[in-house]
Image: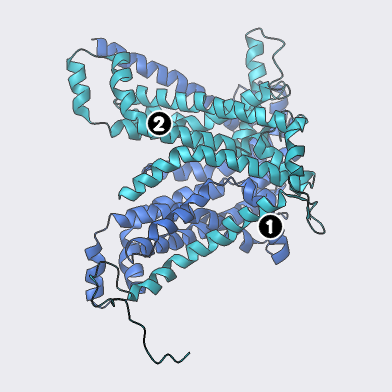
Amino acid sequence: MTATVAPPRRPTSATRPARRPRPTYRWSARGFALPAVLVVALLLYLPFVWTSYLSLTEYNGLGDPELVGLAKYSEMLTDAGFLNSLLNTVYWVVGTLVLPVGLGLLVAVLAYGLKGSFWYRLPFLLPYAISGVAVGVIWTFVLQTGGALDEALALLGVTDPPRWLLDAPLNTFVMIGAATWQGAGVNALLFTIGLQSIPREPLEAARLDGASGWTMFRTMTWPMLTPLTTVVVGLSIVGSLKQFDIIWAMTKGGPGVSSETLALTMYKETFVNNDYGLGAAVAVFLTVVTVAASVLYLRRQLSGAKEL
Amino acid sequence: MGAVTADRLRKTVLVVLGLAWLAPVYLMIVNAAKTNDQYGVLSVWSPAGLGGLWENAVAAWTRGDLSAGMASTGLYAVAAPAIAVVVGAAAGFAIVALRLRHGFAWFVVIFASTVFPMQMLLMPLFLGYVETGLYDTRTGMILVYTVISVPFAAFVMRNFFAGVAHQVFEAAVMDGASTWRIFWRIYLPMAGPALVAIFILQATLIWNDLLLGLTLTQSAETRPVMTALSALQSTYGGSTMPTVLAGGLIVSVPTVVLFLLAQRAFTRGLALGQY
């Protein structure tokens, strides 16, 4: 403990070139970062570990979780309800890529450069400010049996309309429609930001060379939008995987489990059926898929941040 | 000439699509304003004045418990983002201005947590909240909403502070200011517009939340407004549909108004979040 001979010291800060911050700020830097790191660790990372653990157990919310290895995963993968939910989730991902992203791009391109383009985009943006539950309320009203859509169709002579919310997979498709109504506008806004950042000179040059309309879009605009498209596509995939509110408000995953997605299945297995182990297994599965999809755009976001 | 026709075509497509987009909003307003008698008789597409709007709104507000939900959510949507922007800005300040060791790694740790779906957190949050007595309390809801807002706040603020010359910090140090003072008196005020953009986006997100409310609350006093609306929809419906629609209208007004007033801040926030 009482060292008599001091060991040879590494050069002190006085002799080292001063490119590192002065040590005086080391503790204060930690102090400022601590609250954020602490809350994120306690309420986001710890639950993450806990759920992963629960997915290896049999647990009904009471008593103690009992370790069962991968049993819950094999139960999950052979469960018809889960496979149906997985299929619906695939519909959601693909549908969201085609509809809200495609329509968003269409609206952005059509409105770009028009006088008063903000006003042309506004109707599409408005639903974005409305919550998923309220969107669900509105569209349930439109699509319920004998609802607004059926009434409009009756005027056109369709007396036997499809049962929009009752038959699968139609109920999933119409809910993707509701999500499109909500989400297309924000994609249009993002694409507009992208269009505004494209330099004008090359476009002008191409125009002088006689390019116009579709050719112009395909050969000039679209390639220059690619970085932004990556972000929009990534956000849309992740958003569709997380979609809960609209489905909860319109069908609660029903009839039966016919319109459940993974996000719904996790919730219902856990909090309705009290099968925490199975719910956790579904959560882990959903997380793996979501993280894989997020890498697509996160990498770009973080590399963009690092350059700053 | 060709350009003029093309512009006209573009406008036509946009107007037709835009009207289709507004149709559901029209249906909601028109039918939220019908009395129960009118609703049973008239086509849902035809307007009938605003006779029933007040009555339906009152029914949703009182019998549907939206009043308590609005009060709780109002508190959550103001308190949580306000705390979160400061916590996030402090982290950004530590990483950029104070040059926290391994700052970028910590930044990734904080931000990467946003990729977990909420489903991964619900179960432990529920169990932990029951264990610690935070379940079904307003404190618990403010805490969880704050935490989910922190990563985005830290992300935007770190990027914002990265654009500030380090000389600003050094000059303040020369003047003898403490880091605490530099943060509160120089860095935070400078970041005003970014803070507002984060605040507005997160407040909207919290206002519209259903899932956390569903999982972590129970009583009408603590339940957030979207969870209350969802319950209202399950209880009413059918011939009392106007009440549910009026409820949907009430809870949408604050975010739509905020959005229209702060459209630029929204756009800025989105742009900040994407790049």
Pointer 2 residue: A229
The residue at 46%/24% (across/down) is A103
* Above or below for A33 versus A230: below
* Residues at discs 1 and 2 both on one chain: no
Q: x and y percent of residue B233 in the render?
A: 70, 38
Camera-near label (1 vs 2) is: 2
Task: Spot the residue most to the top.
Answer: A157
Callout 1, which amino acid? Glu
Task: Say which chain tag 1 marks.
Answer: B
Q: x and y percent of residue B192 in the render?
A: 34, 57
Secondary structure found at label 1? loop
Callout 2, which amino acid? Thr
Write down which chain is painted cyan. A
Q: Which quadrant would residue A15 be assigned to in this image?
A: bottom left
Secondary structure found at label 2? helix
Left or right of A180 in this view: B233: right
Instruction: Tell me the crowding category of disc 1: few under 14, some 14 to 19, or many 20 or more residues within 10 angstroms, Cα based.
Output: some
Q: x and y percent of residue A264 in the render?
A: 68, 38
Instruction: Tell me the crowding category of disc 2: few under 14, some 14 to 19, or many 20 or more residues within 10 angstroms, Cα based.
Output: many
* Above or below for A247 versus A42: above
Q: x and y percent of residue A57 in the render?
A: 76, 51
> Chain B is which colour?
blue
Asked if residue B263 can be seen in this view, the reply is no
Task: Say which chain tag 2 marks.
Answer: A
Asked if residue B172 can be seen in this view, the reply is yes
Pointer 1 residue: B221
State the CA–CA distance, disc 1 to disc 2: 43 Å
